[in-house]
Amino acid sequence: MVHAWHSGIVPGAKRKIDEGTTGMELTRKEMLKLSLLGSAALLLPLERTARTQVSVRDRIPEGRLPRPFRTPFVVPPVARPVRTDATADYYRLTMRRARVQILPAPFGPTTIFGYNGITPGPTIRARRGRGTVVRQINALPQRHPVLGYRPTTSVHLHGSDSEPQYDGWADDVTQPGEYKDYYYPNDQDARTLWYHDHGVHHTAQNAYMGCAAQYHTSDDLEDSLPIPKGYWNGRPGHYDVPLMIRDAIFANSGELIYDDESESNLMGDVILVNGVPWPVMKVERRKYRFRILNASLSRGYRLALSSGDPMTIIGHDGGLAPAPVEVGSFRTGPAERYEVVIDFARRKVGERVVLRNLGVPNSREFASTQRIMRFDVVSDATDAANNSIPSVLNPGEGPYSPMNLQTSEAVRTRRWVFRRKNGLWTINGRTWDPARSDASVGLDDVEVWQFENRGGGWNHPVHVHLIDFRILDRNGKPPFAWERGPKDTAYVGENETVRVLARFGPRRGKYMMHCHNLVHEDHDMMTHFDVGPSGVDPATIDPPRPYDPNNPPPL
């Protein structure tokens, strides 16, 4: 079935489905058993290693990279439900391999994995109190065309308090030729979420290939505020704009290169915003709200404007901030979301403003990664409505809002140490084991969790599923100004200690915590915890089912 939102990353781009089946597959556990490489730091299939090395040698030289600010800004299409009923909206998405034109000529098209064959995938919009059901069909090839692995998938709606069986449990994988229906309650404060692949040992590769997209929820509180609104569709009067920022490595052919540098990180030299390299966005002289998602596998950014103008943080991973905060720059790690208002009324028509990356420690910076995108001021404001920022945004009411919690309510403190040890990415000295729970938390208990980054030159963006938390302190000092809102991912920099406070609920079951440097996650820097007396493996509750495209099951 072809949907109305099945459009290209760049208008007019052509695509075709190409179901190659080259390559071989060995799991990491099989390799450990066979002792093929003899080092936990080199757990890559031999064929995959050779192919990766060939691809790295074919990387576009710095002097041949596309010139920035030559491509128009675009946004992903908005998904349309295939049906609705009194309580929910129903969507059908198909993960497909496709060929799309990401880099401009003379570079060739790029092979991607995308929801409905595009990257980023369609944005899903939902309303608080109304459920969403998303059928995710894995129509990916049996083997990755270069890396050789079998692209099993597990979709995680990042930022949702979903039931465990619909939360993207790493081992609840959908095979090519299968599907799974995911149920989302949408019962939290309005927020910017995103859905992305979460399949065990291949999250980084599948997300890097393109399986990622935003998901927005709204509510009455957000509607009542005079902040910029209206989903951007290229027409004046729409000032609420998604920005998915990521880096990538390309070969001279235009294909993606996956190089995780001995399982440590992937640092690209091409910056993509909504799938477009260094785009140019035309803006009016007024306020815009940008939903900024760091969708990179490993890279952190420190964002600032070339004009020196401030930016106003109004929202975080878990929704609107208690109050706006004005900053000159801010740091964002992988998976973090910040809702940022930029006021272009400070600029004259004809001026240009570059969103810059000032860099963070231990991210490999290139001249090309110092710029993200450009804003061209082209006219005065055509709409004066929803063009202000109130001093109070979100009072943080409700039992699961972390902003009004007090440390005196915490029943315990848990310590989590993130470290690379003997070549392994570990949490408290252990790697991922789906059969082992590392914490048992009472339903509705309030706890302090302390994240410690010990050893090595890496940052660890720590993501805790199910909950929103409040950052209490960083190395014993108050959190940075830009992170004083509801969060689900905490940037834990080199040798930093970050304490967070949360109430655990409202669901029972097994939930994951992991480093969201997805290279680290894929190499088992994950754990899970139980909320309430559950003990049930999420992969067994509502498993994927075979999908027959000639006789599709009803949705």
Image: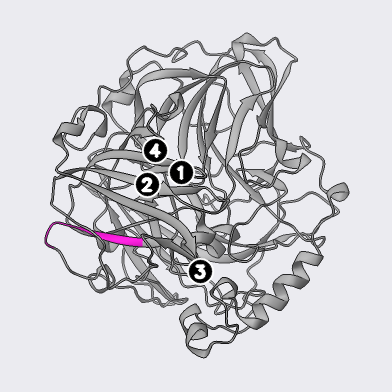
Q: Of 105 and 390, which appears nearest the observer?
A: 390
Q: Which quadrant of the structure image shows residue 401?
A: top left
Pointers 3 and 4 in contact (C-beta within 8 Å):
no
**Label 2 secondary element:** strand
Report, in whole angstroms, how far the alpha carbon at label 2 lies from the one at label 4: 18 Å
The secondary structure making up most of the magenta span is: strand
Residue range corresponding to the magenta coloring: 527-533
Pointers 1 and 2 in contact (C-beta within 8 Å):
yes
Report, in whole angstroms, how far the alpha carbon at label 1 lies from the one at label 2: 7 Å
Pointers 1 and 4 in contact (C-beta within 8 Å):
no
Q: Residue at x 70, y 71 (%)?
A: 52
Q: Which residue in the structure is indicated by mark 2?
A: 451
Tag in front: 2 or 4: 2
Q: Residue at x 38, y 64 (%)?
A: 429
Q: Which residue in the structure is indicated by mark 1?
A: 492
Q: Position of residue 414 (x, y in %)?
A: 26, 49
**Of the residues under marks 3 and 1, which one precedes in the sequence?**
3
Tag shown at residue 356: none
Residue 68 in view, yes or no? yes
Q: Amino acid at mark 1?
A: Val
**Label 1 secondary element:** strand
Relative to 95, is 517 above or below? Answer: above
**Of the residues under marks 3 and 4, which one precedes in the sequence?**
4
Q: Which residue in the structure is indicated by mark 3?
A: 422
**Label 4 secondary element:** loop
Q: Of 300 and 158, which appears nearest the observer?
A: 300
Q: Position of residue 113 (x, y in %)?
A: 57, 63
Q: Amino acid at mark 4?
A: Asp
